[in-house]
Each structure stands twice: as C-alpha cells, then as structure tokens.
Amino acid sequence: MRALIRNRCFRFAPDRFAWARPMVVLLLLLGPIAPGLRAQDSTTSSAQEGLRWGRMTAHSEVEFGWRQLFLGGNRDLYRSHVNLDEGLRLLGLSFISRYPENTGPLFDVLTYSMASWGGDPHNTASLRVEKRGLYRFDFGYSRIVYYNFLPTFANPLLGRGELLGQHSMDAARRRSEYRLTLFPDATFRIHFGYERDAQSGRAFTTFPIGLDEFVLLDPPRTTTNEYHVGVDVQLGRLRVMVEQGFRAFKNDIHTTQPEGTINLGNSRNPANPTSANPQQILLQTFARDSGIRGLVPTTRVGLQGHMHRTLMLSGRFAYSDSDLDVTRQERAIGNLFDLSVLRYVTAQTSASLAQASRPTAIADASVNYRPHRRITITNTAQFHHFTIAGDVRTRTEQQLGADLRGAIPPPLTRLVVESLQARTSVDSFFNRFEGAVELTPRLVLRAGHRFTHRRVTLWRPEMTEREESELNAHAVLAGLSLRLSPAFRLFSELEHGSSDRVFTRVTPSRFTRLRARAHYRPTPALTLSLQLLVTDSRNPNPLVDNVRRNRGLTLTTLWTPGERLALSLSYTRTDITSTILFLHPRLRTIETSRYVADDNFVDGDLTIAPLRHLRLALGYSLVNAQGTLPLNFHRPRGMIAYTFPRRFTWSIGWHWYGYNQKGFALEDYRAHTVTSSLRIAF
C-alpha cells in the first residue's frame, strides 16, 4: 500500500510550456514599449468612445499575463492554502455593448466577463443579455478546485514518517446557472431557471474492520440538476411570488484498491499478538460501488407589501418532499479480523438497499409597524417541520478462517442479515419581538425578546412508544444607537439567553453576548472603526460541561487624503477558550478536551500614485496564533502599474507566502509569485 500512496499522491502536471516561459516573460516585461509608442501617436477619441458598429457601441478590456512561482517547503500544504501555479493566465476579460435609448433589434445591452482562466483554482464567467421591457437573460459559471492534503490531519502514521493525510482530496466543483426573466419591468413577470452543480476528482478514505484501517481510493463524483419556474405579480400594494422547483441529484462513488496491491493497513502488528495463532492483518482486494439517487420537488410562495404607510407585511411558505434511494455493493478479500465473532475473515461480500424520505414545511411571517415616527415595532415568527423516515437492509456473507486458538471450527461461512427502520420528526417554532424608540435624533434605544421551541420525536419498530424531547429557550435583547456628532456613531447590543435542557453537546444552555461597533470620521479623508465581541456560554450538563469564552476586537483605519494616496490598516485580536468532556475511545474514561485560540491578525495596504499614470501598491498581512495550533503566516506583497494613454496598462506584482507551524516543520513552506500582466482597453 505504501507504493500505492507514493504513486497516487497528488502532484502538479509537468510544465508543458517550459519552452515558452522565457519568451512570454520577456514579452510582458518589455511589452509596454510598443503600446506606449502606439498610444502616443493616437490622437483620436475612439478609445474613449469605444468601438462602433452601426448604432451599437462596444467597450472591452482584456488582461493577460504570466505568473512565475518559486516554492520551497511543503508543496501539498501550499496547494491546500494558496494553490496558485505558474504559467500563462487570462486574468480578466470584460465586454459590454449597448444600443442608444434601448433601440436594439434583438438586445439593448449585452455584458460578458471572465476572470482567472488558464490554470487558477477559481474561474468565473458571466453573461447578461437584456431587451428593455421584454426579457433579461443571465448566465453564470464558476469552477473551484478543492485541494486538501494536510500531512498532520487524519494521519495515524505520521510518527513513522508517512505524510499522507488519509482523507485527502483533490476535486473540482463546476457550477453553472441560467435564468430567463420575461417582462422584467412589468407588474407580471415570469422567470425560468436551471442550475447544474458537478464535482469530480480524486480522494482517499479509510475502510475500518476489526482491529485495523486500510487506506483506499475514493474519488467523488456528484451531480445536481435543478429546474424552477415562477411568477411575480404586483397586486396593488402587495407583491406575490410563486415558484415551483425540482432538484435531482446523484452520487456515484467507486471505492477501490488497485489489483495486485497488498495493503497492510495502519497497524503493522499481528492481530491479537498474545493469542495462540497471531496473524498479520492485510487486504488484498477491495471494491465498493455506492449509488445515491434523489429527487426534491419544492414549492415556494411569498408575499410582501406596504398595507399602510405605517404597516409592512412579508411572508413566505415553502414545502418540499424529498426521496432518496441508496444502493451499495462491497467485496473484500484478505486476512481480516471480525470482533463480533473473534475469527479471521478471508473474504467478505456485502450489499445494502436503503430508502428515505423527508417532507419539509417552512412558514414565516414578519410585521413592521410604526405607530409613531419615533417608534418602530417588529415581530418575526417562523415555523419549521420536517420528518425523516427511512429503512435500510444489509446482507453480509463472510468466509471464516481460524479463531484465536488457531483452529478452524465450523461454520466456515457466516451470513448476517440486518434491517433498520426509523422515523424522526422535528417541530420548531421561533419568534422574535423587538421595539425601537427614537428618544432624540441622536439616540435610539432597542429592546426585544426571542423565544425558541423544539420538539423531537423518535420512533423505531422495536419501541413500545415514541420517544419525545422538548426544548424551550428564551433570550432578552437590549441595544442602543448613539450619534454623538456627525462624525461619531456608536452601536451596541446585549443578549442573554437560557434553555431548559441540553439539546446537543455543543449547544449552550446559558449564554451572554455583547456586540459593539464604533465609527469615527473626524475628516473626510480619515475613518476609524472599532468592533467588539464578548461571548460567554456554558452547557452545565455533568456529562458535557461545555464552557466557552470568546473575546474579539477589530480596529480599522482608512486614510485617503487625495486621489494619489490611500492607506488602510486593520488589526484583529481573537481570544477563545473552550472545554468539553468526552469519553476516551480506548481507556473508556471521562477526559477533558481544551481548545485555545490566541490569535492576532494584522493587515495593511498603501497605494501611491507619484505620477499621473503610475501607481505603486505595498501591503503586508500577518497571522500570529499562540493557542492550540500555534503558527505564523506572513504575506507581504507589492505591485507597480503604469497606464499608457488611452488603451494600455502594464503591471507587475509580487506576493510572498511564508507559513510556519510551530512543532511541525514538515508543513512549513515559503513561496514567491511574480505576475506580469498587460491590460488592453478598446
């Protein structure tokens, strides 16, 4: 299996454009010379007015360049954090065309844009075509690469020098969206939509059985298609929205171990070394095919309107009934160990069928009432109900080997048939009432109350009666908005709440939260801001005893004395302490888990334009953590851009990434990226 890990670790593809690198870099570094000469010779105003084709006017910008990467240290962690590779890039493209006074034959306005194409982990594209009063069409596309390969995460073999995170992933998610709106400016509008979301790539997972775990290939492959159609109608003061949607999704995963590979698992010791017949646990062949199919029809109804100059109402109702079907086929061959029968297993096949459904209903309403110009009363209520009902049937066949004494007693085969049915219903009600009084034009006081009720009902066939649990939570709110002067504003809110029982291990039964913001602008060029967060919560259940303390402070400064100078500074301090009781999986004793975050984040940017067409930018970011995960992350950066008259802008930028995790030098990396680009406007 070690050979499998070495061969399957994720790496960058070979650079197929190495021969072109010097030529492109030279072109982009010296490229401003020729555009500058052409721009100086041009005296027409066509660049400012754009391109004309009959009555249509078009404007466009394109920016392309080359990024060079200099990387030292852990490449996998760099890709997990930053993942910017070198090569030729289309950094941005935008195009807009329009007809004057909405007189186009097919469209009045067309806009198109692209960003970060050519190998970056996040690519986007968008299109809008509009004919005033008739239709509006929108298209959006994005591709995001998720690379997660942390050597110290889910890696029980780290002490032996293995750097494979056994739940690593290198997958790409592609999302596209289409939306057509008919009569967008009318009181009656119709819209159609389609969305597609697909993910594919490579990943690792583990197969646990008996006394060991085995690393396997587990590539994700999911697809979701969603269709919806709806109407918006303006009925007097009331706006009504109705939409019907259908979502279909599938998830097909083929988990395998390559043929001919002997997988010794995470433990190199024989199973039960003190027994009469200790044997090495190993996996020779493994294949699992899982298929998930689901359909979710959803109906949505909403309304909003000003019923009176003092009264505004809004409401929403949504209902969906999702169905899910799951199939699984699994085959394993090797020398495994089953703790339920205390015997070695030489072969095992398993098959499962499962069905589940989840009808869901959500209804909420909000009322905003102003009986007086200085008094505002708001009430928001929400009801949420869903039921999860399902069953699963599993059939497992095993070829049994020796027991702990070394003998091979009968039976030689074992058949296990299992079935499970369960039904869980959740009802929740939420209500928030808040009132605001403007005592003076500079002082506003707020007070409110929030109530939450949850009831969970669990049923299984073997239960003689349903199991129910309820939770009631109350919270009081108080706040103020103060404007001491036109330059100084202050906002604060205090919230204190409690519940009558523990709902989950990490849900507090008592909490107090204070939030405050201050904004000071002594001059039009200088802005100072402060944000403060103080939270204390506790779950005093003797089996949980979860205590959390959170302190956060953010200071920001923005100084813009003129068009040619801008300075922004920010500092964030985070102090978090959390403790919780847990059951030790091996010692079977109650232990305390403690998490501490003592983090400082500093960020600054300076932009200077010493000349009319020359812009310089410098920046620095620092993350300093001293808690449970101590680390330092430095990110200095710089950029020079020169705009030649009318059309061309050349820029060169530099970023440095220095990551240092204290105690884990194997995860450190240092990377420089240098990007030279040319932007052309026409």
Image (tube, helix red, strand yellow):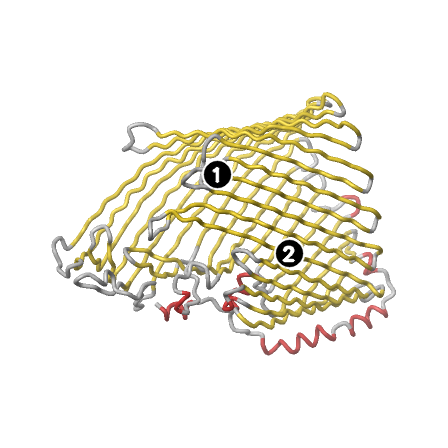
Cα gap from disc 2 to disc 1, whole angstroms: 30 Å
Q: How many numbered marks, from 0 up? A: 2
Residue sitting nearer the eye, 314 or 450: 450
Along the line of sight, the residue nearer the viewer: 132 or 539: 539
Mark 2, residue position: 601
Do residues under tags 2 and 1 come within 8 Å of each other at their CB atoms?
no
Question: Which quadrant, please, contains the N terminus?
Answer: bottom left
The amino acid sitting under disc 2 is Phe
Secondary element type, mark 1? strand
Q: From the viewer's perspective, is residue 462 above or below residue 615?
A: above
Quarter of the image for residue 658 reads: bottom right
Taking the image as shown, residue 342 lies to the left or right of residue 678, namely: left
Q: In the image, what residue type sits under mark 1?
A: Asn
Residue at the spot of label 1: 539
- Whether residue 238 is visible: no
- Could you say which quadrant of the image residue 8 lies in? bottom left
In the figure, 269 relative to 542: above or below?
below
Residue visible at 36% across and 45% down? 326
Task: Indicate the position of residue 634 as horizontal and vertical percent values.
Answer: 63, 64
